[in-house]
Image (cartoon, helix red, strand yellow):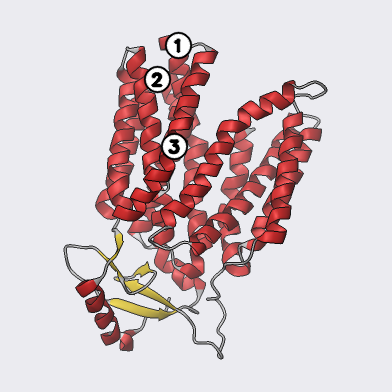
Amino acid sequence: TMSAFAAGRLLFNLPCGMFADTYGRRPLMIAGPAVTTIGMLWSYTSGGLGELLAARAVAGIGSSMFMSGATAMLADLSTHGNRARILGANQAAVLAGAAAGPALGGAIAGAEGMSIRSPFLAVAGLSSLAMTHSYFKVSETRPMTTAVDDTVKPSKHWYCDGHPIENPSEVLEGEGVVKPVVVADASTAQDAAMGRLVKSVDFWSVCGLNAALFFSGAGGRGTLLPILAYQSFGFTPDALGALFSAMAVTSLLGLGPAAAITDAVGRKAVIAPCVIMSAASVALIGTTTDPFAFTAASILWAAAGSLMGTAPAAYAADISPKNIRGSALGIYRTCGDVGLLFGPLALGALADSAGIPAALGANAALLTLAGGVFHFTAREIKRDGGAKSAAALGSSQSHKSHQRTA
């Protein structure tokens, strides 16, 4: 059923992102929980496996709709200076729900008068509350950049070396050279902006990193780690539950400080060491024969993921033009869902043929490769002041005659 849920998300991430760019974020934040409610109620009443899978796919579509609206809205409401912290608060809520969900679901299913289907009904109730809250409390944040209003001077998109930035005080770091900033009308066509985005090495490198992280999380941590703990180290179900609880708490506690650090020092400065730490942890998990080292490496893996936090998502939002931000983040999430869907299948098949240590070694190698590609190809965007900003702004003025259309 998890694959059906993931498939629903995978297929609708980009269409929902495009909808968010054209019609706004708020409709998705209302309709998404409504569709999830329908999927959960259908799951509760399903009469067979096929019907249950279809219901779970509907719930996944609702999740995609809500996340498309929510992530674009949070990106709209944040700036380069606080985006990791804003996205981190949302991720903390997601982690808290993921940590508490199994325990609450088990308690509901085991309560007197309840059944194994009852958690679906509980989630449907929570989704309907989210829908109601969005309807009455959420305001639209979509930048009005797709229609020309002759009575209002349009806002501007700024580009440095073809790379979108939020304002001319943000310049790309690159070999100590200040590159020219070019201003383009924000009412530019979305398809041209998308054409620029899909040619961006920065964008695809962070999308590849996101795919590798989800591949590793679902295939390595979610699939291979519990099997290895049971088969090689004799973990009981209680001990395994305690290990995953410790990992979840570690992830949750580290998000706040990590997001603040990411906003302070930049995305790349956080991502590179965290990817190295993750890969080293995975390699140690696959090679150690000491249960204490295995436990420590597992918690270190969770800590590395927590410290990396929302840095990749914040980077993706940073480099996405405002008028196609929903679509850009939809592509970014789709890459993650591809990793989520194929990670367990690929690493599980490799573990069956070559053993779990070899599969974890491949996992570590993939993380290292994706992190290396991102580090050496993606460019950091940094809020800069002083001479660089003045030089960049002066350069933009000198290039006004060569304005680009998006």
Closer to the camera: disc 1 or disc 2?
1
Q: Residues within 10 Å of mark 1 (few under 14, many from 20)?
A: few
Residue located 29% across and 58% down the image: 380
Q: Earlier in the sequence, mark 1 or mark 3?
A: 1
Quarter that holds the N terminus: top right
Q: Earlier in the sequence, mark 1 or mark 2?
A: 1
Mark 1 element type: helix
The circle drawn on residue 253 is: 3
Disc 3 to disc 2: CB gap under 8 Å: no
Could you tell me residue 355's position as x and y percent?
Answer: 39, 18
Q: Which residue is mark 2?
A: 356
Closer to the camera: disc 3 or disc 2?
3
Taking depth in this image into account, of 46 and 104 the one nearest to the observer is: 104
Mark 3 belongs to which amino acid?
A: Leu
Disc 1 to disc 3: CB gap under 8 Å: no
Mark 2 belongs to which amino acid?
A: Ile
Quarter of image, res 254: top left
Residue 346 in view (yes/no):
no
Q: Which residue is mark 1?
A: 231
Residue located 28% across and 84% down the image: 399
Residue located 74% across and 45% down the image: 37
Looking at the image, the residue that sits furthest to the top is: 234
Quarter that holds the C terminus: bottom left
Q: Separation of disc 1 and disc 2 at Cα?
A: 10 Å
Looking at the image, the residue that sits furthest to the left is: 176
Q: How many marks?
A: 3
Closer to the camera: disc 1 or disc 3?
3
Could you tell me residue 75's position as x and y percent?
Answer: 49, 60
Residue located 27% across and 54% down the image: 377
Mark 3 element type: helix
Could you tell me residue 262's position as x and y percent?
Answer: 35, 50
